[in-house]
Amino acid sequence: MEQELGLIGFGEAGSTFAGSGKWGARAHVFDRKTDDPADAQAMRDAYAAAGVTYAPFMEQALSGVDLVMSLVTADQALAVAEAAAAWLRAGSIYCDMNSVAPQTKEQAARLVEAAGGHYVDVAVMAPVNPARLSVPLLLSGSMAAQAASRLAALGFSNINLVGENVGRASSIKMIRSVMVKGLEALTAECVLAAEAAGVREEVLASLDASDKAQSWGDRADYNLDRMMIHGLRRAAEMEEVVRTLDGLGTGAAMSRGTVERQHAIGALGVKAPGKGLGAKISQIIQSNARKADAA
């Protein structure tokens, strides 16, 4: 990797990409979690493991670099773009890889471009693990082709250009999420109700009879796993999906329900889901009971 890179956010995506691409010290990383005493040591360990350059301030992460990647939580994406705009090098490419509505990316683009930067809308279309640098990326914006070349040089291998308008890539991701995350939320609603009624096996068997591509038990197990670990982040992303649909005027009733269900499961704080569907259901039931007792 010959290019210098400013990386904002070093969670699962940022650390996975940096480690897989062996970006090393040329990646200058800022993550505000390092300022939190509860997370500081874990963050410093992550920087050391990846060999990246830790920047205690955003200004240091962006100083002198002409490629910036933003990989933060959905609720922080716009605030980060606004903060970064103050330190961007003129002519630099700002790749916003966050899962937010096209309207949010349009707002961020105005901030970045007013500061002399080039904004590129990047949609990450699958979990970063296990795909890592082969994760599908959709890019849109006037500088999308140039950004694609720079990202390819970093090791990304599955990049597709989808247009010159900021918001087009994120529209594809947001509208796809109506189905992907909605199915997860419906899964939780279904299996928890089936457990309460004492008919879980019968319901799953009935579903299996109508769809043999994958057993519904395995599908439910996977969906609950995703929600328990990433429910809060997914709920934040689904808030952006609701905003997308509201902007289109097509209605977002089911997606609003998905926000609530994803948040409810994620807020239980179960970060180590049990093995198997039954274990996960038990963890959710017990966590809900503890919350009810504490209320």
Image: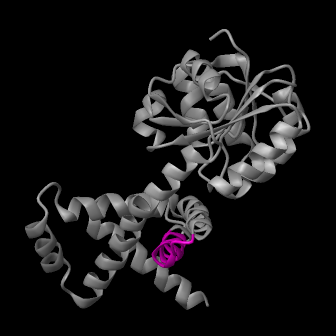
Q: Is residue 173 visible?
A: yes
Q: Is residue 272 visible?
A: no
Q: Quadrant of residue 51?
A: top right
Looking at the image, how many numbered discs can be counted on the residues?
A: 0
From the viewer's side, name the closer residue of 28 and 112: 112
Residue at 47% from the left image edge and 85% from the top image edge: 289
Q: Quadrant of residue 189?
A: bottom left
Q: Quadrant of residue 101?
A: bottom right
In the displayed structure, 92 sits above or below 263; it is above
Q: Position of residue 27 (x, y in %)?
A: 70, 22
Q: Position of residue 65 (x, y in %)?
A: 80, 21
Residue at 13% from the left image edge and 63% from the top image edge: 211
Location of the C terminus (image quadrant): bottom right
Q: Is residue 64 left or right of residue 163?
A: right
Q: Is residue 233 left or right of residue 5?
A: left
From the viewer's side, name the closer residue of 283 and 223: 223
Secondary structure mainly formed by the magenta segment: helix
What is the magenta range?
249-265
